Image (spheres, rainbow, N blue to C red):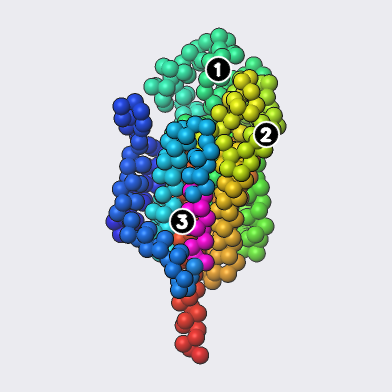
Amino acid sequence: MILSLAIYILILLIPFQLYFNFYKTFSVSIAQILAGLIFIVSLKKIYNLCKKIVVREYANKENEILTITVLIYILVMLLSIIVSDDKAQSLKYFIKWTSFMAIYFIAYANIDNISSLKKCLQMGFVVIGVTSLIGVCEYYQGFQNVYQWFSHSCLAPIIIEPETLKDKLIMGHNNWVIWGKELGLRVFSTFDCAIEFSAYLGLLLPFSIWIIKERRQIVYIPVIVLILSALLLNYTRSAYLSFLIVTAGLFILNYKHVNVKKVAIGIMFFVIILILSVSLNKLLREALEIRLNYSALQNSGRADVWLNGIKIFLSRPVLGVGVANYHNGLLKYIGANAVLLPAHNQYIQIAAETGVVGLISYCSILFVAIRYSFEVFRKTLDEKMRYIALGFIGMWGWYCIQSFFDTYLFGDKFSMMFWLMVGLNASLYRIYKNENKIVSGLNSNTR
């Protein structure tokens, strides 16, 4: 009970992290400290779960396939450090990212019933509503008014004298968008990057169907409208594309249970938001012409960036150039004049840093998690559990699509929430299997 409550608090803290810097060498957030404490307290449970993997007599080893793939991916990242040119850099980020991946084990070990799982998802949904509200407020109230500390260093001079920053300082923050001579900001809420914020919304927005179905309260409709508003004002094309494809996909998967009137109302709300956004902000009229604010992209499109990543991968195809060594790989294999940008493709960057072995192990995590979700969706007799599984299917669809265009997995806030959701996905599958076993036992007893 106490550990479940701690996980609820962790979900609340992830987007609102306060960092402590120690001797100017490393920093740690309150959320990371809390996750570490939960992990330590949960060590016995986590050990028992991992022990089941190697015990041959364990009857439900299928439940642990996702855990195995996560452990393999951690091992592959560790191996990539051996071949890394900058081992200190790789080791530093390996420790950081595995600490985030530990949240998977926290969620999987402690969320072992459907009630706790529902509370986690409800808490997450409320939190994205709050972050969306902050994003919309910062957009229409003025970023410099919402974040005074930020305005003094970056926003204020750009707002006062935008003409002086066309080619240099205007490119200093990746939340700017430019349409010709127009200048605007993308909603990023409490996140460092607008793209990371859009991906964070994608982790929980697909659960809207379950939230409405579960709670049956009209109060959640305005929350969903608020989240969609933040998504629209985020100006991330990959998020728009993911949203449209996932919405269509979920509609097709669930067409037998779809209420046409409710779908029509939902579409109407979305259209109203779009119209209001257009009328309130002339920049949105040219949304399809959004150009990201990296100065280097003026001379280097997505295709060129992807091609550079593929060249790095082909140069070191087995274990890659090492965790967090992508920029070093650019300098070594592309040249000193290489544009030091991320790969803008999650799969290419992982392949470049950890090789084909890392890419296969990473994709195995996605494959197993998606398989879990589809099995629960197709076979469970519990309607509410079915809608939760549908939400996970939507989450994975969004993540896999947007990963083709951005590399946000390595953002602190997104990464923590991502691995927590992976753990919840594994918990859902275990709960389904356990309930299925109980039903099968009851049926055999009645015979």
Nearest the viewer among 46 and 196 is 46
Give coordinates of residue 27: x percent, y percent: 36, 32
Marks 1 and 2, how far apart at CA? 30 Å
Going 35% across and 36% down the picture, which residue do you hit?
A: 28
Q: Nearer the viewer, mark 3 or mark 2?
A: 2
- Badge 3: residue crowd in 10 Å (few <14, some 14–19, many ≥20): many
Residue identified by numbered label 3: 424
Residue identified by numbered label 2: 311
Of the image marks 3 and 1, the number of the one nearer the N terminus:
1
Q: Is residue 20 left or right of residue 311?
A: left
Q: Amino acid at mark 3?
A: Leu
Marks 3 and 1, how far apart at CA? 40 Å
Going 53% across and 38% down the picture, which residue do you hit?
A: 83
Q: Secondary structure at mark 1?
A: helix
Classified by dominant secondary structure, the portion drawn in magenta counts as helix
Res 44 seen here: yes
Q: Amino acid at mark 1?
A: Ile
Give coordinates of residue 437: x percent, y percent: 48, 75
Q: Is residue 128 above or below residue 325?
A: below
Of the image marks 3 and 2, the number of the one nearer the N terminus:
2
In reply to whether residue 66 is colored magenta, the answer given is yes
Q: Which residues are magenta?
A: 62-74
Residue identified by numbered label 1: 170
Q: Residue furthest bottom?
A: 447
